Amino acid sequence: MSRTDDHPVGIVVSVDDDHLDGIDEVVAGLREAGMRVDAVHDTIGTVTGTADPASLNTLGSVPGVADVEPARGYQQPPPDSEVQ
């Protein structure tokens, strides 16, 4: 499946160590910048969700954001496959 600039992409945002105590403020900034937040993992300092590709640079400039990267999928092979 190809992605175009019209379709949101899954992303993972890493929060820098200095902003972990204020992760709620970082999440609010991400939402204001256009991210649709699915989950906040405050223990490990990540936020997952989707955003339009055009907004990725803006998300990276939100105070407290260390990195914005595409979400990676994983699919385990079926139990009867030879890759077990």
Image: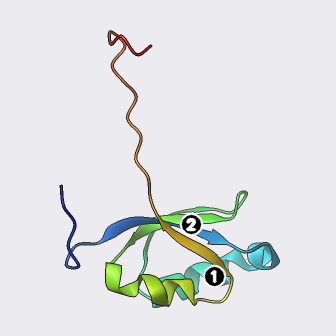
In the depicted structure, whether residue 5 falls above or below residue 13: below
Rendered residue at 33%/19% (across/down)? 78
Which label sits on residue 66?
none
Residue 9 at what x, y percent from top left? Answer: 33, 68
- Amino acid on which the number 1 mark rests in the picture: Val
Contact check, label 2 and label 1, Cβ < 8 Å: yes
Q: CA distance from mark 2 to mark 1?
A: 9 Å
Q: Residue at x 65, y 84 (%)?
A: 25
Quadrant containing the C terminus in the rendered view = top left
The x, y position of residue 70, in whole percent, is 44, 64
Asked which secondary structure carries label 1, the reply is helix
Asked which colour scheme the image uses, the reply is rainbow
Q: Which residue is mark 1?
A: 26
Residue 50, position in %: x, y? 38, 69
* Residue 47 marker: 2
Q: In the rendered image, is residue 80 in sight?
A: yes
The quadrant in which the N terminus is found is bottom left
For this view, does 2 lie left or right of residue 29? left
Q: Residue at x 74, y 79 (%)?
A: 22
Residue at the image position 69 percent from the left and 63 percent from the top? 42
**Residue 21 picture quarter:** bottom right
Q: Earlier in the sequence, mark 2 or mark 1?
A: 1
Label 1 crowd bin: few (<14), some (14–19), many (20+), radius 10 Å: many
The amino acid sitting under disc 2 is: Val
